[in-house]
Amino acid sequence: MRKIALVLVLILSISQTGCWNAREIDELGFVLSIALDKTSSGFKVTAQMASPETYSKTPSGTGTQKPKPFWVITSNGKTIFEAVRNMASVSSRRIFWSHIKVIIISEQLARGNTLEIFDFFIRNPELRLRTLIAVTPEEASKLIDVVPIMEKDPAQYLEKIIKNQKLTGRSYSIMLKDFMEDYLDPSVGPVTSRIVFDKSKSEPVLKTSGAYVFDGNKLSAVLREEDTRGLLWIKNKMDDSVMVVNCPYDNNPVTLEIKNAKSSIKSYMEKDVPHFTINVKADAIITEQSCLTDFNDRQKLHELEIALGTAISKDIQSTITMAKNMQVDFPGLSRTLHKQHKEQWHQISSEWDKLFRNSEVAVDVKVKIHHVSLAKPLEPIKTQKKNAQ
């Protein structure tokens, strides 16, 4: 009997195998990017979807006109989910989210209550939490319909220009999972990328510029590029960026490439006042100079290092001042205090907004400039001729 029962169990188990929720790939519409806009009655959702028939055959770059490897569909609804479901009336394929790269939200929509937006994304089991998120002052739907020159589709284009901010230090890059961590923390103001159209170009060209700060459930303010750079220093997100400082001797610009930047924060409480010290260490390389100073002279090089350190400190202090004036801790100093002084944090967390406004923040910057002797400054030709005479 045991053998018979075992055989029956095996037969029944085989009959139950299979993927109960399997979907055929040719029945799915792969969303690569999504844009959210506000309407008078709710939401407009625009999805950029891959066109499998042309995607693998269409090379990136210029040349003769070829069919677009993507298509864009738009739908409206009272809620985001209703708008997404309404896409079934214009799409022959079921919407599939696992390949999405970028979420774009219009500034107009973000200035309202964004709780419904992020509730939808968090509840969607197909959506990757590593998806990039950005806000734009433009109509969001227009950004994901731009035909890029160097990439196959707008999603790749947007993803790369957001990630390339590390080369300039003028914008901010954040994934959905990190944004939501800040969004759900009442002591921290979340920050997103800011994407705009480059008005100096005749063709539609996008660029990252500054960042956006949220306060609670709503977008609160725009960060200038300088303040965004200060934020990157504070959050230890500064990478191979560029800074331009005035030459200490003739006030002409010197361009430096930042390397090996590291930031750390120390904190302590004294008489109910939070104290923070932001320590920055970085290397730099002179990539261009308009002044005639020869920085092979160690003393002159030291003066340039001081000028660079002062510029970095100024950016950081400007960002801290802006955060205090806004009464929004978007630099995330509360996280440092919480991590380093857990017991004290639990006692003061309910009053953090007031404490942050009165906090003391010091900045200590140490920079080292390398490879100075690779080239001496170029002298103007007229000066050289006069010296020759």
Image (spheres, grey):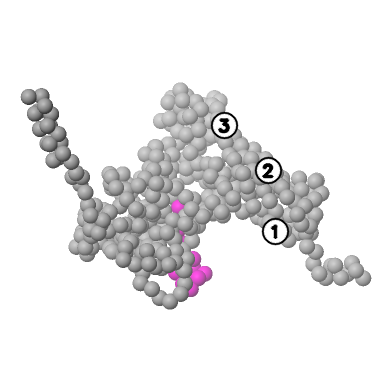
Q: Is residue 339 left or right of residue 369?
A: left
Quadrant position of residue 387: bottom right
Count of all numbered marks drawn on residues in the image:
3
Q: Which residue has dot 2 on it?
A: 367
Answer with mark 2 or mark 1, whichever residue precedes in sequence: 1
Quadrant position of residue 190: top left
Q: Residue furthest top?
A: 343
Task: Specify the segment rendered in magenta.
Answer: 193-204
Under mark 3, the amino acid is: Lys
**Closer-to-camera residue (366/370):** 370
Q: Quadrant of the C terminus?
A: bottom right
Under mark 1, the amino acid is: Glu
Distance between the alpha carbons at the discs numbered 2 and 3: 19 Å
Q: Residue furthest left?
A: 1
Distance between the alpha carbons at the discs numbered 3 and 1: 35 Å
198 falls in the magenta region: yes
Q: Is residue 275 left or right of residue 68?
A: right
Q: Residue furthest bottom?
A: 64
**Closer-to-camera residue (104/188):** 104
Residue 122 location (% of width, % of height) = 31, 44
Q: Residue at x 50, y 41 (%)?
A: 331
Residue 338 location (% of width, % of height) = 47, 30
Q: Which residue has dot 1 on it?
A: 288
Secondary element under disc 2, as helix, strand or loop, is strand
18 falls in the magenta region: no
Secondary element under disc 3, as helix, strand or loop, is strand
Q: Residues within 10 Å of mark 3 (few under 14, many from 20)?
A: some
Height in image: 157 above or below 372? below
Q: Residues within 10 Å of mark 2 (few under 14, many from 20)?
A: many
Q: Which residue has dot 3 on it?
A: 266
